[in-house]
Every structure is written in structure tokens, then in C-alpha cells.
Image (tube, grey):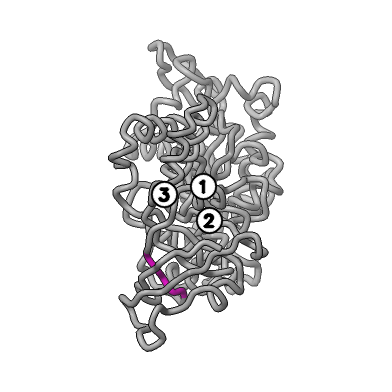
Amino acid sequence: MIRINLIKIGERIGVTFYTGAIKAEVLLDYCGYPTYDPTSQGIVDGYQRLQKDSAVSNVAERTRRALTDFDSFVDNINGNIRDPEVHNLAVRPLNSKKTGDGDIYTFDYTPASLKLPQIWTVDGQTRVKGLAYARALAQTDKAYKEVARINDMSVGINLTFTADIYKECFIFYLLNHYSTNIPPEGALRMMYDGFKNGKVNFKNEITSGRGRTSFADIESMEVTERLIHKSNIWVDSISDFNEENRANKISIRAMTNILKPLSISVDNYRKQKNIAKSTVMLTFEIFEAYWKGLEIWAPVMFDPKTKSDYGIMKASQAEVLTQVLIKIFEEHSSWKKLGTTIGSLTDPKTYQSLIKVAFDKNNLDDMNGFGNKVYGTDCWKVGKAGSMGKYTNSAAKRDMRDTLFGNIKTELKKKNPSII
């Protein structure tokens, strides 16, 4: 049994928080790292990013160089024990009459008797991993006195006891919400998974407007999820949080941001028209049909053998083309009133018909990175051979959107001059 003295901080989000000190040996022998795995079933299997090896090594080096100072641990780490019984059975007030905030408790930690003994590092994982690496290096060097000194160091810890992994994750979110510690795609993944699983803290964070993630973000993220798993075009082109193979892929956050204005427009439209199909499903079907139409028009840009020569699925270029789709979506009703029906918005042939002339080499030209004029699909070639890669800031992307959409309207106006 290991006795750890704790001071009760108080209850937050239905979890009691304590603070205290723990021997490094105990922490390192029983710590766990809740790292997000893109192949998992969601954040219940982990929610944190992978730590950089260089950062872990820096902590290890600093620890070994100045062990007496131990200044990598001037601040507490945050840990959680998920065993459902341990809080009731093993945490007791030192004085039974003093059980308020600021009072002293004892925690009789017996890892061998617990079903879930790990102390999960909710925050401070880089430092804990660095300390573990420092101890491992000392063991490799047979510096046993150094190992003993590391084991005997005290680490400040804020400790919780909850079996609810979503609450543990939400604590992590709150700890890092106003800093840059959580990558944007990591924060989005946590908010989305927590919301979709009906966890009240995540739902309140989104619906209250206190956080950075809105309900529109959640709906757009759900479309992104469908693209990852069900799209014929995008299935291998979107990278999840912590995914190792991110080359030539759009992050889930970037794709969600691209989809968000389309999702909002679709949501407003279906409410006006009393369409039963969900915003998520309708947005997915429209987006998928549009990109399938682009593929039918220019298969060379999507063929696995040649797609690497084109940047049409890179974030900035995909954003421009999606903005064109939004303009089509927003104006198709007015075109219909003027007598021009473009076809079903969930049919790829609708978009192929709109694009095949408007974007061909006779109607679309631009200056590439070498100062030469390029035409049609060549505008989307990667690097300086193409031209679309240079449209990266908001104003430039908006101008290219207007050019592409203007070409579509020009072709429509040839048959129906009343289109404005």
C-alpha cells in the first residue's frame, strides 16, 4: 500500500479534485497515456496528440542534467484514476469532521488490488514521458544511484477519480482550451465524439456558445466523417487527428471548415423547403455528387496513377471549388424561376454539364508559376506548372471562385440571357 496525502480542492463538473505529491517511482510505474488512435472507435480509447520525441528528450536531458533542481516539474501534472471503486474505498479525510474544500485527505493506493490501477496523465504527458525516459537512460547507463534519486523525487499532482472517460477528456479540454496545446483537429475530434455520444458537458459546451466549437461545426464534422468512410472521391484524402500518414491529405479540421458554409446554406434551404432529409446527409450527397462530377469531367486529376500531378484536392484549391459549389447551390433556385433548370443537385451529371465547357481549355486560362499561360485542367497542375496553387489568401481565393463561377454563368446565359 502507498499512502498519498491529498488536499481537497473541490467539485467541478461532477468530479472531486485533489492536489498533492506523489513519488516519481509510483507515478512512472503506473502511469497511462490516453493518446488518440485514428483507427480506434473514438476518444473513449484516447484523446491526446502524440508527444514529439524531441520534446520528451529535452525533458529527459534537463532532468538528468539538473536533477537536484527538478525544474521540469515546477508545476503540477494532472492525473486521473478510472477504477470505479477506488474513490469511495481508499480516499478518506484525515479528520472525519473536516471534509470541506482545503481539508486534508489520505489516499491508500494499492495498485495490485485495483481493476484499473493506472494513473492516466490528463495533462503533463510530455513531462511524464520525459521523466520516464530519463529513468530508462539512467538504467541503461547502469547509473543506479541516479535511478534511485529519480524514483525518490516528488511530483506535484492534481488528481481526480472518475470512471467516465468523457469527463476525463473534458477536463483535458478545459485545461487546454485557452492555450495552443490542443491541435485544432484534436479539439474538434473531442468535441464531435463527446457530442455524438450524448455527453452532457460536451453538449453544453457547444450549445451554450462558450466554446470555440459550434453546432454547425459538429454537423460539418459529421459530413467529414461520412466522406472519410463513404466517399468514392475523398475516402483516402482526409487525415484524422494523430494519423501518421498525412502527406497529400486534408486535415479533418480543414475539411470541416471547407464544408461548414455549404452545410449552413443547405440547412437553411432544407428548413425553408421543409425537406425531411437531414442537413448532414443532404450536404454529403451534394458535395459528393459535385466532386464526382468534377471527376467525370477530368478523370486525369483523380486517377491514382496521375492525381499526384494535380493539386485539385489540396486544401486551398478544394476550398475554392467548394465555394463555387456554394454559389451554384445558392443561385440554382433563381435560375429555375428564370426558366433554366440545371438538374438534381445530388446527380454528378448536373455538375459535369455545368463544368465541362466552363472549365475547359477554351474558356479557362491563367498564368502559371513560370509566367506561362495554361489552360483548362492544366491550371490545377502542382507547383509552378499550374496556377491554382497561388490562390491561398482569402481575397485571392474569392477572386478565383468568382472567375470559375462567372464562367459557369456565362455559359448558362448563352441559352438564357435573363440570367443575371
As displayed, is residue 292 above or below residue 382?
below
Which of the 4 image quadrants contains residue 205?
bottom left
Mark 2 highlights which residue? 120
Q: Is residue 233 left or right of residue 212?
A: right
Viewer-side residue, 275 vs 176: 176
Mark 3 highlights which residue? 124
Residue at 37% across, 88% down: 97
Residue at 53% across, 31% down: 139
Mark 1 highlights which residue? 28
Gap in angstroms between the C-alphas marked 3 and 1: 13 Å
Residue 67: x percent and y percent?
34, 37
Residue farthest along the bottom direction in this orientation: 97
Residue type marked 3: Gly
Q: Mark 3 or 1 closer to N-term?
A: 1
Image marks 1 and 2: residues in contact by CB distance under 8 Å: no
Gap in angstroms between the C-alphas marked 1 and 2: 11 Å
Residue at 60% across, 60% down: 111
> Does the rendering let one see residue 173?
yes
Image marks 3 and 1: residues in contact by CB distance under 8 Å: no
Residue type marked 1: Leu
Q: Is residue 11 left or right of residue 349?
A: left
| Quarter of the image where the N terminus is located | bottom right
Residue at 62% across, 26% down: 301
Residue type marked 2: Trp
Residue 19: x percent and y percent?
37, 65
Which residues make up the magenta segment? Answer: 15-19
Residue 419: x percent and y percent?
47, 49
As displayed, is residue 18 above or below residue 401?
below
